[in-house]
Amino acid sequence: MKKSVLALAMAFGVSSAFAQDLTSKKGEPILPEKGDWALSVDATPFLGYIGNFFGKTANNSAPTFNFLGNRSVIMGKYFLDEKTAIRVGVNLGLNSQTVKNNVTQDNYTPVTDQLPPVVTDKSNFTTFGLGLTGGIEKRKGKTRLQGYYGAEAGIYVQTQGQSNTYGNAMANSTAAGNSLTPNSTTWASAQTDAAAGIPTYTGNGPAGTRVTSDKLGTSFQFGVRGFIGAEFFVLPKMSVGGEFGWGIGFQTTGSGTQTTQLMNSAGTQAITQSVSTAGSSSFVFGTDNRNSFFGPTGALRLNFYF
């Protein structure tokens, strides 16, 4: 009986000492303090890198800072005091990509033993996105294990478009009566090689036309979520943790404009026409896997405080 009481007392004493030891051997504070900033990154690459050493996995690639979130929001915090932090997320991106394809030149004079000359069709894809999130975080706990909760809201705006230029001019294909069929060799196949980063190419519109520009409607997304999470401080001002969120989200995409080129009814010149494309909207309520553009959520992550 005495041994059991003594063992229990020793265990309580050790755990109490550990719970109160909130500074390193060098006197550095372990938990965040008033005025601290924080940055969160995905912990998965680091944990996988370490695990592969033990599993002797081939091609163990070095980890990188991959920010979570379906739109790669960079999230930071600022501590008003040791229990309260302001959370801010920012995403600003512009992607412009040009894809070229050679096609046979129209109306050339064949030369014996020579390949036909080629001209180039070119497509330019542009995407611009801007996202902002903001919220408040409250923390609980007096040990290395910290719980937290709070709420935040966010908006995201995105525009996308494609423009095409063609190496061959559009011309009348046959005699009058079939003047709406373009007599021009164009890049008509769809390119959907996602692994190579090639966007979907829209070359042909309705019969007898070819697309010169395709501007999608502006997409706007708004969301509000509550969150709760926990993190454990493995080193001074460095923790591993994760969080769970639940909220609502609304997204709307406006109508776009597609411009096409075709021959006039007389078959004498190429003209352009523009038509509107339909928009869309959606509403979601649920966990982060259905409503997530708030940055590093729903997975283990590393948190750095400085």
Image (tube, rainbow, N blue to C red):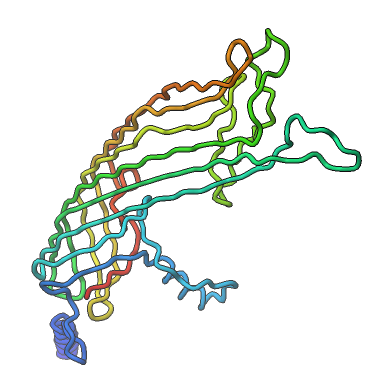
Vertical relation: 97 (above or below) 24: above
* Apparent side of residue 222 relative to residue 149 in the rendered image (left or right): right
Identity of the residue drawn at 16% across and 80% down = 19
Q: Position of residue 106 (x, y in %)?
A: 73, 31
Q: Please give left or right for residue 144 compared with residue 73 in the image.
A: left
Relative to residue 265, is residue 93 drawn left or right?
Answer: left
Q: Nearer the viewer, residue 278 or 146?
A: 278
- In the displayed structure, 236 sits above or below 161; it is below
Residue most extreme to the right: 112
If the image is split into quadrants, where does the N terminus sit? bottom left
The residue nearer to you, when weighing 244 against 65, is 65
- Work out which quarter of the rendered image holds the C terminus and state it: bottom left
Q: Is residue 41 above or below residue 22?
A: above
Q: Position of residue 279 (x, y in %)?
A: 37, 27
Residue 241 or residue 77, whichever sits in front: 77
Find the residue positioned furthest to the left. Answer: 81
x%, y% of residue 228? 21, 56
Residue farthest toward the top in the current orientation of the protein: 177
Q: Is residue 1 something that shows in the picture?
A: no
Quadrant position of residue 40: bottom left
Query: Residue at (47%, 32%) from the top-left corner?
Result: 214
Q: Quadrant of residue 39?
A: bottom left
Q: Residue at x 10, y 72 (%)?
A: 34
Confirm whether residue 104 shows in the render: yes
At 66% from the left and 32% from the top, the residue drawn is: 168
Q: Position of residue 64 (x, y in %)?
A: 43, 69
